[in-house]
Image (cartoon, coloured by chain):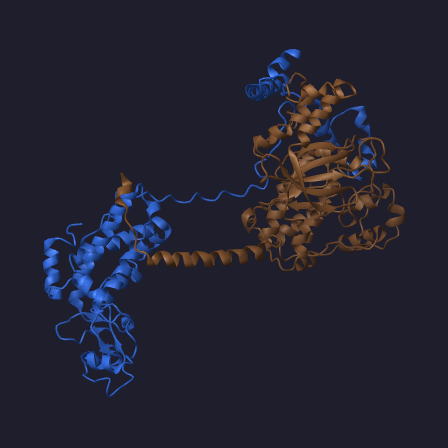
Amino acid sequence: MSRVARAPGASTKRAVEDGGASHLSHSLRSLSIQHQSPSKPARAAADSASEICPVCKSSRYLNPNMRFLVNPECYHKMCESCVDRIFSHGPAPCPIAGCKKTLRKARFRMQTFEDLKVEREVDIRRRVAKAMNKEEADFETLRDYNDYLEEVEEITWNLILKIDVEQTERRLRRWEEAQKAELNPNAVRRSVDNGPDISTLSETSHVILKKGGTQRRVQGASLGNTPIPEDDTGFSFRGLKKRKAPEPEKAFDPTGGWSVEPLYYSVKEEYDHKFFAVKHEPKFYAFGYKAPEYYSHALRDAFGGLGVFLEDDRANEVIDFGTQAAAVAAGGGRDVEMNDVF
Amino acid sequence: MGMSPALSPRPNPPGSHGPVNAAKAKPLVHLLNHKTVPSPSLTSAATTPGGPDEGLAEEMNDVVKNQFVFGARLGEGTYATVYRGHYREEPSKLVAIKKMKKNTEWQDGINLDSLREMKYLAELHHPYVINLIAVFTTKDENINLVLEHLPRGELQDIWKDKDIAYGGADVKAWSNMICQGVWWLHENFVLHRDIKSNNILIAADNSLKLADFGLARSFANPEAEMTYNVITRFYRPPELFLGSSHYGGCVDMWSVGCVIAELAVRDWFLPSETDLAHLGVITEVFGVPTESDWPGISKLRFWKEQLENTPAKRPQPLSWWRGRMPLIGDAGIDLVRGLLTMNPVKRLTAKQALEHHYWTAAPKPQKKENLPRKGGKEAEKAMGESLKRVGETEDDKMTKIARKLDFGAMR
């Protein structure tokens, strides 16, 4: 981070904006969920200013069903009919004097909090929290995690207080893309092929008017002329564990990994021995008896014991029991003599 | 996991069960061979009547017996009563104890069924074959087989319970486990001779286990005659109905085909009322075999009375199979038809079944942990729901509490 929210520069800026009162504390004091239609007459009288649409100046007194909407682009309040009137034919600039933001009708919504500063802060926090979603388990140490939380808070405050917004937004976007790439490399490769992902851009970047050709050119140039290095993830955090890709699933093995192959012999298809002279009888070709099964059975029986050394097995066991006996002896102290008896 | 046949089948292939388990199960066998092994209780052995050897055997039996504790009775059959049990040392490790009943016909010696079961299970260890942990006697006359505890019932319960929904991937996973288990038996030259969907049990991890080796025997020598009156009727292959007394692994493979078909149609595949009628049911589906597709069939014992005068019949076409078993697809139908081939020589062997293209065709076999199971699904769902609700309220509480940073804890 280049600047910290609580740096002196930031606090002066905050003072200018808020008239000296601490932004957050002020917001918290007035934090209350706004009712759709304030029922208390006293309250209605108190906020009479907020009952008049700043664009068309119609008041709730004349139109009791009036609803106010805001757009998270600039948080300027206006009534529903104004929104319909101005933005029905596509994106248009905000009608409030001095605000040149281009707004879309689709993003207008009812405000949740009475205080629009709180509304904006909640929106920003929600967006940052969506991008910065690491947990304690993702970090090497608790200290690293706490540092990370601290930095997330800084990013949030920078956005809230409009410090380095361009820079922070860009880094946040890079970080989101990097996170997505880590989760699903294939999806990102696809989106790179098809150009930048529209959905993420519309979420974070400003809407550009079609007719604003110059603006578009500038934006396009800034996007095109500054290629972002592949390994730039926007942010880097100390102690962040690299995400491990899950192991690819193994192919199914119908034998379950078991196999039996003879070590000391091989089974022939045919054995020319008088014992098998009967193989031309029906019971060998019709009854279901298979001579090859018998051949391998006989060979298995003949060679079955090879490679098994009872002495070795017993030696191992004696050691096993010996230690057991030693343990018993240590406990009881009686069996040592028993050893001598046998 | 691969084992060499040149090595005698070891009781403990790697991975089939833990070393602790093995060490506990061993003493009976090995102590008998090692009289030099000291045992804290041996002092009393000398005083027991019947000579030192008998006393020692008794002591060793007690050592094994005392490792296990009997629990509730789970079920009772004609030949045995099954109890739940557990290790005395580790009560969380469950076992099933099969207490063989004393047979009035076999006053002297051991019941043939339990002898077969012990003989083969003691040597066969495979993830899809039930594991025999230990054997001991109580009161000197009852044989108790300590088997692994398989709490999820029989495979038959799955298709019979209409509340359980399963698909082609599940059938494939189950079929494959059955084929692997049977392959292991045949590879070790053991015939099961009673494969059916209620002899296939389901373990806690949803794998299937071949159980009930009461009719098992090893592959016979060429001259030895075997009985043809084995295998439950619905699963019995045609050559046994025709009186073949020389057979091999193929009889089990027919049963495997029946079990898979049963899973695919969710019903008995070849139901019949009597043994005599069953060959008719088989020929209804597979046609009447002739000398041309089953050379030597006329030499079979009961061919004359059973099939000679039956009018010729064509086997059911592929469309009939497709209509009955849409669940397993063409590849699965090919496998089932391969396993249910009338001529035992042409029938797929266990090894050929495992090499079949059904396993590699789509869909992939279901993962073990996702297989449907009896009762579990509903119960688990209900449990999951209730757990989830608790978890949510806990989370909600947490979000209302401000995060506390404890910097002191970092040093």
The correct choice, above or below, for A164 with respect to B55 in the image is: below
At 64% across and 42% down in the image, what residue appears? B149
Residue B246 coordinates in the image, percent (x, y): 81, 36
Q: Is residue B346 visible?
A: no
Residue B14 quadrant: top right
Camera-nearest residue between A66 and B344: A66
Q: Quick one: which residue is furthest to the top in this view?
A: A340
Residue A276 quadrant: top right
In the rendered view of the protein, which quadrant contains the C terminus of chain A? Answer: top right
Camera-nearest residue between B170 and A221: B170
Colour in which chain B is shown? brown
Q: Quick one: which residue is furthest to the right in this view?
A: B305
Q: Left or right: B183 with respect to B218?
A: left
**Chain letter corresponding to the colour blue:** A
Q: Left or right: A13 with respect to B20?
A: left
Camera-nearest residue between B262 and A54: A54
Residue B119 coordinates in the image, percent (x, y): 73, 32
Residue B180 coordinates in the image, percent (x, y): 63, 40
Residue B208 coordinates in the image, percent (x, y): 63, 44
Q: How many marks?
A: 0
Q: Is residue B28 visible?
A: yes
At 58% across and 57% down in the image, what residue appears? B378
Q: Left or right: B307 with respect to A75?
A: right
Camera-nearest residue between A235 and B291: A235
